[in-house]
Image (cartoon, helix red, strand yellow):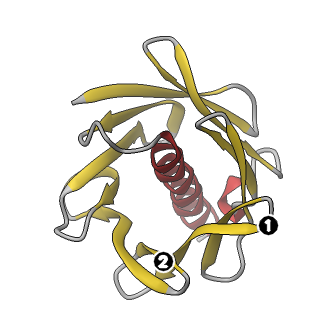
Amino acid sequence: MTLYTAEWQDKETINIFSNGRSVGRIVFDTPGIVAFGDADVYADGQQFRVERNGSFYPLTQNGTEVFTAVFEPLWGNLQLRLDNSDTGYDIKGKWFKAGTRLTDSEDNDLVVVKSEPWLVQTMEIQIVDIDISDLMIVATLYHHVRASAAKVMHVVLG
């Protein structure tokens, strides 16, 4: 298992590192209000874009869909789809286990993102599958941060 770290640079930017090497970056559009989710995502030396559309979170590059994360309210997870077809990958939490996980079709963990509740300056990213792309690692972190912010907003606002 490989460990990455993610750190907030300021109120809208998160940098992701592996052994001091930059792996990616997320820049949210609205400083301090990341629950709404629109952001530029950088991974594998390329720029991508996520813009929330209801329960859909399409990840695009130059206007072309890479994949779309679709929120499934019954289970509380995100199903990753390409051309409206299930890819078998999900981003979700698991009962009685900390963190947000990228899982495969067999429900095996590929990436696990963890942070301390209320103190999310630094986050730990466990890479279980060493063949996973930096883009999928950054996408998992993006959804972890967005979901964590939404939970905090729900608790604070009731």
Q: Residue 45: which quarter of the image?
A: top right
Q: Which residue is mark 1?
A: 63
| Residue under the point 37% across and 41% down | 114
Badge number at residue 133: none
Q: Position of residue 26 (x, y in %)?
A: 67, 41
Q: Position of residue 32 (x, y in %)?
A: 75, 46
Q: Residue 126: which quarter of the image?
A: top left
Q: Residue 153: which quarter of the image?
A: bottom right
Q: Amino acid at mark 1?
A: Gly
Where, quadrant-wise, is the C terminus in this rendering? bottom right
Q: Amino acid at mark 2?
A: Arg
| Residue under the point 55% across and 83% down | 83
| Number of on-image labels | 2
Q: Is residue 12 above or below residue 20?
A: below
* Element class at badge 2: strand
The answer for how far apart the CA atoms under marks 1 and 2 are is 16 Å
| Relative to 89, 133 lies left or right | right
Q: Position of residue 38 (x, y in %)?
A: 75, 60
| Relative to 4, 25 lies left or right | right
* Element class at badge 1: loop
Q: Is residue 51 above or below residue 125?
A: below
| Relative to 110, 10 lies left or right | right
N-term-proximal mark, 1 vs 2: 1
Q: Are marks 1 and 2 in contact (CB under 8 Å)?
A: no
Where, quadrant-wise, is the N terminus in this rendering? top left
Q: Position of residue 50 (x, y in %)?
A: 70, 61
- Which residue is at the front of the view, 82 or 127? 82
Q: Which residue is mark 2?
A: 81
How packed mark 1 is, by other alpha carbons closer than 10 Å (few <14, some 14-19, many 20 or more), is few
Q: Is residue 44 above or below residue 72?
A: above
